Structure formats: C-alpha cells, structure tokens
Amino acid sequence: MASYQRDLAVAYALRYGTDPNPGYVYIADNDCTNFISQCLRAGGARNHYHKTHPWWYEAGNMSGSWSVAAMLYWYILVSTENQQGIMAASFFQSTSSPLAPQINEAIDLGDLIQYKDSDGQVRHSTIITGFTETDHGVEPTVTQHTRNAVNVPWRKTFPTAVFHHIIAIN
C-alpha cells in the first residue's frame, strides 16, 4: 500500500478548483466527484480494477465510482473493508451541529467530505483544502466542482456530511 500524498492532492485541488484541468473530461453540471477523483489521483491513487467496485480513468473514459458521488462513497467503504484501493476512516456528522471533536481531531488536509440528502443518498463530494476559525471553532474549508469554488465553508444545505480520513491508497 502506498501513502496518500495529501500535499499534492490539495495543490491539485487549489490549482483546478475554479478552472478545470483540460487534461480530463469535464462533466458540466455534475463534475464534483470527477474532480475529487482527479485530486485523489494527484495524491497518488492508481486505477483499481476491482470486479464489483472499480475506480479508474483512462483516455476520457471512467468508472462510475470515479464520477458519481454515491458510487465513490461505496467504493471507499468496500475498499476499506477489503483493505485494497482507497481506504478511509469514515465519520458521519449533521451539518447543522458543531463539528464533533473526534472528527476535528481525525481530519486533515486532503481528506474528503461527501454529503447525503434528506433521503440518505450521497449527492456531493468535496476535498478539505484548508482550516479556518469560525464561531464553532476551527473548521475545514473545502474545494469543489459543481459550483466551482476554492476554500469555501464545509457546511452545505445537505443534512448529513460524511468525512473520509484517507488512511491508505492502493
């Protein structure tokens, strides 16, 4: 297993957060997870051709888990369970509550935050690219596509956030 190069993932996110990388397909109106997968690639993640949960990008083609938020979520959970691919310690948090101390202590630059809607479906993906002092204490800022933005607050209108602290990559 390789170490996740957080600094490279964050540098990529900051570079291409508002101006997408022309070397990758841009998915208009729904590019968030495609962008996050690019960040993971920049951090050292390689294509993973798992039989049931693949994660890959080649010559403009991609797996579902590369570009669909819910599929990336399941890919990370299955990879963590199987100890192969992109592995993470995952934490769930209401977006309206103060950030739980155990999450705040666990997360780092380059970790992911995904968001579940009121039906429990994962709909959005972001990457932590900074931290800032707020009324709630120190909280992460994120960079994202599908409303391209750099270092915006992590709190969204979705009711639940899933924090993925990346522990290893393939």
Image: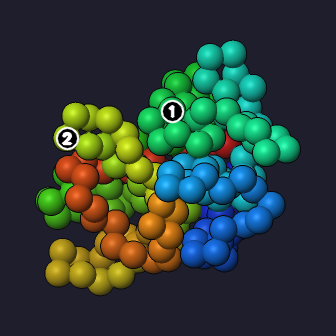
> How far across and down, in percent of the image, does residue 1 sit?
73, 39
C-alpha span from label 1 to label 2: 18 Å
What residue would you read off at disc 2? 118
Q: Amino acid at mark 1?
A: Met
> How far across and down, in percent of the image, does residue 118 sit?
19, 41
In the structure shown, which secondary structural element does the residue marked by tag 2 occupy? Answer: loop
Say above or below: 92 vs 142. above
Say above or below: 140 vs 34. below
Residue drawn at point x = 50 percent, y = 51 percent: 30
Q: Is residue 34 left or right of residue 115?
A: right
Instruction: Name the residue nearer the viewer: 35 or 98.
Output: 35
Residue drawn at point x = 77 percent, y = 65 percent: 22
Q: Is residue 135 visible?
A: yes
What residue would you read off at disc 1? 71
Quarter of image, res 11: bottom right
In the structure shown, which secondary structural element does the residue marked by tag 1 occupy? Answer: helix
Q: Is residue 111 visible?
A: no
Q: Is residue 29 left or right of residue 83?
A: left
> How far across and down, in percent of the image, does residue 74 sit?
48, 30
Residue 33: image tag: none
Say above or below: 161 vs 110. above
Residue drawn at point x = 36 percent, y = 61 percent: 105
Residue drawn at point x = 38 percent, y = 70 percent: 140
Q: Amino acid at mark 2?
A: Ser
User: Which color mode does the image show?
Assistant: rainbow
